[in-house]
Image: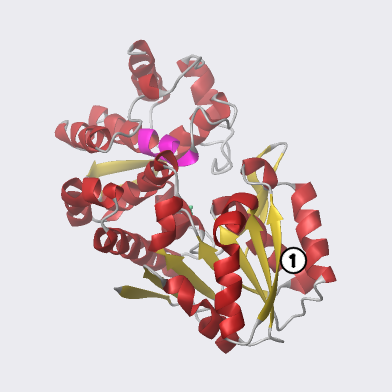
Amino acid sequence: MTETVHVNLPGREYDIEIGAGVLDLAGARIAAIGGRGHVAILTDETVGGLHAASLQEVLRGAGLTSDVLALPAGEATKSWPHLERSVEWLLEQKVERGDVVVAFGGGVIGDLGGFAAAILRRGVRFVQIPTSLLAQVDSSVGGKTGINSPSGKNLIGAFHQPSLVLADTSLLNTLPKRDFLAGYGEVVKYGLLGDAEFFTWLEQYGPALAEGDMDARVRAVRRSCEMKADIVERDEKEQGDRALLNLGHTFCHALEAATGYSDRLLHGEGVAIGCALAFELSSRLGLCSQEDPSRVRQHLKQMGMKTDLSDIPGYLPDADTLLALMGQDKKVVAGQLRFILSRGIGHVFITSDVPKDAVLSMLNDALAQR
Ligand code: GLY
């Protein structure tokens, strides 16, 4: 089963092809994009070790030569030194304006590779081949590229849309379970933010999907990409609705900062906890029913995911400090914290009108349960 989602941005439109084995299409699809017939592949050492030879073989089958740069796996690679190394390598590879760069990996490689492509010769085309669930449903789609700065995450970057996304769901089989479930946090986010029926479907099929049911995986990735494409088409540069994709992220970014961006809390885990907190806050403010946050938590627990602050190991700062960390989020506008809150599952909205005391009292209660 292969599904295609089209991202309809005039002049920058592209397809996302989703399915078990779509990696096999890479040669034909990349050859069709054009270029000199030589492909530069950026990957990480883990993904490269597992899958780069297969990708190069498929490219060879379509008459394309390729070279691979495998960077260290992990968030630290999204940095100036590795960007410099990647761009210089691409120049050594003599990548020209018409050529194609492939970003083959999870969110780190997709963001870094996309940014390298955005700034090389003022922009060359690139193809995303995302290998983690998080990258397949979120970071490979929509053109956000960039690196981290010592001042914060994702603070340096550019919007640069890929020419094609190939999301091969069979590559998820080699993903550690914890990483898979962290990516699933972003999948749940789509149901919660805009499609109650999808959330209900996830409640039923989420466990099978985690166990490896390929049809369920394809369907979940497809629906997530459709929803993301729809929002990106309305608001490519995040002037409005695209911020809805940040459901759970204000809390998540504070928790990631509080845990030092370490493996105590993966990004997708923070998103899942953040979604539960956003629903809890919405319910306390009388915006949605009390059942909604319980239902969100119940599903996350059913999936064996981190759900509450008590699931984060080690020290966490107090509520005031967490609130201050939220204020450092780059999505703060004119000093005002923006929250994505909910009027029910599938119905969220953006607001700056949230009483500080309500946030503090909810965080205090959540911390007290630790
Ligand atoms: N990950 C949020 C966005 O792409 O806008």
Q: Label 1, secondary structure: give it.
A: helix
Depicted 5 relative to depicted 280: above or below: below
Going 22% across and 55% down the picture, which residue do you hit? 198
Q: Position of residue 214 (x, y in %)?
A: 29, 61
Depicted 282 relative to depicted 194: above or below: above
Figure quadrant of the C terminus: top left
Nearer-the-camera pick, 170 or 139: 170
Nearer-the-camera pick, 247 or 189: 189
Question: Badge 1: how crowded within 10 Å, few (<14), some, or many (20+)?
Answer: some
The answer to whether one can see residue 111 in this image is no
Q: Position of residue 306 (x, y in %)?
A: 35, 31
Nearer-the-camera pick, 282 or 208: 208
**Quarter occupied by residue 351:** top left
Left or right placement of residue 199 versus residue 88 in this view: left
Left or right placement of residue 196 versus residue 369 in this view: left
Count of labels shown? 1
Depicted 115 relative to depicted 316: above or below: below
The answer to whether one can see residue 102 in this image is yes
Q: Amino acid at mark 1?
A: Ile
Q: Which residues are magenta?
A: 267-273
Q: Position of residue 157 (x, y in %)?
A: 67, 55
Q: Which residue is mark 1?
A: 119
Going 39% across and 62% down the picture, which residue do you hit? 169
Does the magenta-highlighted stretch encompass residue 237?
A: no
Colour scheme used in the picture? Answer: secondary structure
Going 39% across and 41% down the picture, which residue do you hit? 177
Nearer-the-camera pick, 131 or 226: 131
Going 69% across and 67% down the picture, which residue do you hit? 118
Residue placed farthest to the top in the image? Answer: 368
Left or right placement of residue 335 versus residue 240 in this view: right
